[in-house]
Amino acid sequence: MLLVAAGFAGGTVNAIAGGATFFTFPAMLAVGIPPVAANASNTVALFPASLIAAIALRRELATTRRHLPRLVLIGLGGGVAGAALLLATPDRAFLVLVPWLLLLATLMFALSPRLLGWARRHHAVPGFRLGLAMLLLVAVCAVYGGYFGAGVGIMLMAGLTVAGLDDPHAANALKNLMAAAINGVAVLVFVADGTVVWPAALVMLAGAAAGGLFGARVARRLPARLFRWLVIGVGSLLTVWYFVRA
């Protein structure tokens, strides 16, 4: 019941404001799954949402088509590296890292409007271009996404905006495609390693799918700001709790 509820809450806020991991990952820990396996199972549960969003927004990718091969390859390579790094991290060490990762993700989520606004005002080049610095930034985001993932969408959106991608719809579509690539290859690594706790992952996936459908229906009726503050509040409380626990 807890996993279904957390999946439903995560799917709902993801459809409206983002931030599903703040609900789903702690629920995996709460039912007694070890930290590394909990993160792997959480990635499996949330992966379909990224893939569906990427497919739904495929038309918006037309303006960035020539950059897709490089970006997807970087996403795949970074996702593999991040997933492998997670599997090499002992559970005890990862549990110590969790509050810091949650703090980073909460700050990124809370500051995302200002961060994206700053990026749009100060993007480095006219038009959408990917220099070496931007490709390295994307690679770092991809490794982080394969390792933990909370807030990676915000990081990718900001990086793409700084690279000159001014169209928010195209940036969002490209972000979803990269998230699907990063999470998809991480899922393959976790499945091959046998780290995924399938009963928990599948139960949460069902809740997240139902929450995504519900969130898509209420998105037009309820202000996204309300859900943003809910996610920020949950993220802040969980960060404090895991700092105390660590």
Image (spheres, rainbow, N blue to C red):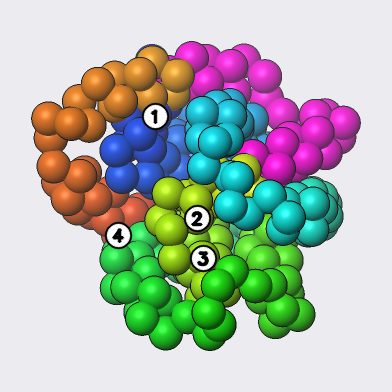
- Residue 162 in the image, given as x and y percentages of width and height: 51, 75
**Residue 27 in the image: above or below residue 165:** above
Mark 4 residue type: Ser
- Residue 56 in the image, given as x and y percentages of width and height: 51, 28
Residue where numbered disc 1 is placed: 11
Mark 2 crowd level (few <14, some 14–19, many ≥20, 10 Å Cα): many
Residue where numbered disc 4 is placed: 236
User: Which secondary structure lies at badge 1?
Assistant: helix
Mark 2 residue type: Ala
Question: Residue placed at 63% from the left, 54% from the top?
Answer: 64
Choose mark 1 or mark 2, whichever is in front.
2
Mark 1 residue type: Gly
Mark 1 crowd level (few <14, some 14–19, many ≥20, 10 Å Cα): many
> Can you tell which mark lies on residue 103?
none
Q: Earlier in the sequence, mark 1 or mark 2?
A: 1
Choose mark 2 or mark 4, whichever is in front.
2
Residue where numbered disc 2 is placed: 171
Choose mark 4 or mark 3, whichever is in front.
3
Query: Considering the image in quadrants, where does the N terminus appear?
Result: top left
Mark 3 residue type: Leu
Mark 3 crowd level (few <14, some 14–19, many ≥20, 10 Å Cα): many
